[in-house]
Image (tube, rainbow, N blue to C red):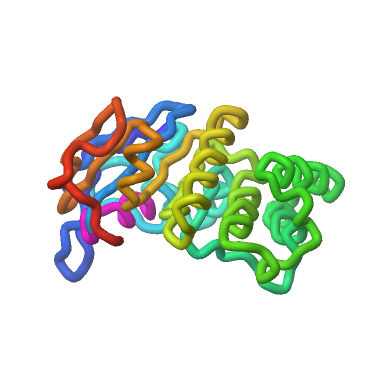
Amino acid sequence: MVNLVNISKRYPNGVHALNEINIKIQKGEFVYVIGTTGSGKSTLIKIINSEIIPSAGEAFISDINVGKLSHRAVPKYRQKIGVVFQDFRLIKTKTIFENVFFALEVIGMDSKKARVRVREVLQLTGIADKANSFPDELSGGQQQRAAIARAIANNPRLLIADEPTGNLDPLMSREIIALLEKINKEEKTTIIMVTHDDSIVNEFKKRTIILDSGYVASDSESGGYLNERQGLADD
């Protein structure tokens, strides 16, 4: 699913964000990517999402070399990837149903099929009863569920969850992780979750990749955090 081969990224200001990164993630895996501010997490995600191209190396997502994509090909490529953000990014003037429906409308899905799919993902994410509500009428946890529903509506091969629990209390955070686990299992979606929440990493143990100053410092198949001295800082 994801194969990053000797990936390096140097920005024009001279910052080396990534240094010869090699990471393989199999289809159906659920992987944490953690590290302190400046470790390279955001750059890694942007390369996978084709927001930036690596300075060296190759990034293959489902056998697509994303660094070689033309500008015209990028939107179609991104249709195969779902992204969930810390700040939800829902359209305030649309209902939850309309928010999810809009994501399918812009890619040209048939309206009837889109409505069926919207109902499916709202049911899956546990907010079917909030379909006619507006984002500001929902709690933070419910808004994140809506954002996840929107991100998976097009059956993406890969879901990137970028600090999805960053604005939530511990109870809501655990509910969101449980939901992502459900999606990983039932939708067979590969998930890469960027986080600095060490309590989540330790409680919901999964493969954990630690970045440090642009290098892969650790790649633990057993999951969980390694030791207290590697405590996670806010990103």
Q: Position of residue 113 (x, y in %)?
A: 82, 43
Identify which residue, 229 or 182, lies in the foreground: 229
- In the rendered image, residue 126, in percent from the top left (x then y), is placed at 69, 45
- Tell me what residue is drawn at x 70 percent, y 60 percent: 99
- Looking at the image, residue 84 sits to the left or right of residue 102; the answer is left
Residue at 37% across, 37% down: 203
Q: Is residue 146 left or right of residue 158?
A: right
Image quadrant assignment for residue 4: top left
Against 233, residue 222 (above or below) is above
Q: Main secondary structure of the magenta part?
A: helix
User: Is-magenta flag for residue 216?
Assistant: no
At 76% from the left and 48% from the top, the residue drawn is: 128
Left or right of 151 on screen, residue 210: left
Q: Magenta stretch: give its range.
A: 37-47
Q: Is residue 44 magenta?
A: yes
Q: Residue furthest front?
A: 171
Instruction: Please state, as top left, top right, bottom left or bottom right, where the C terminus lies in the image.
Output: bottom left
Looking at the image, can residue 9 be seen? no
Give residue 192's position: percent from left, percent from top: 42, 41
Above or below 166: residue 6: above
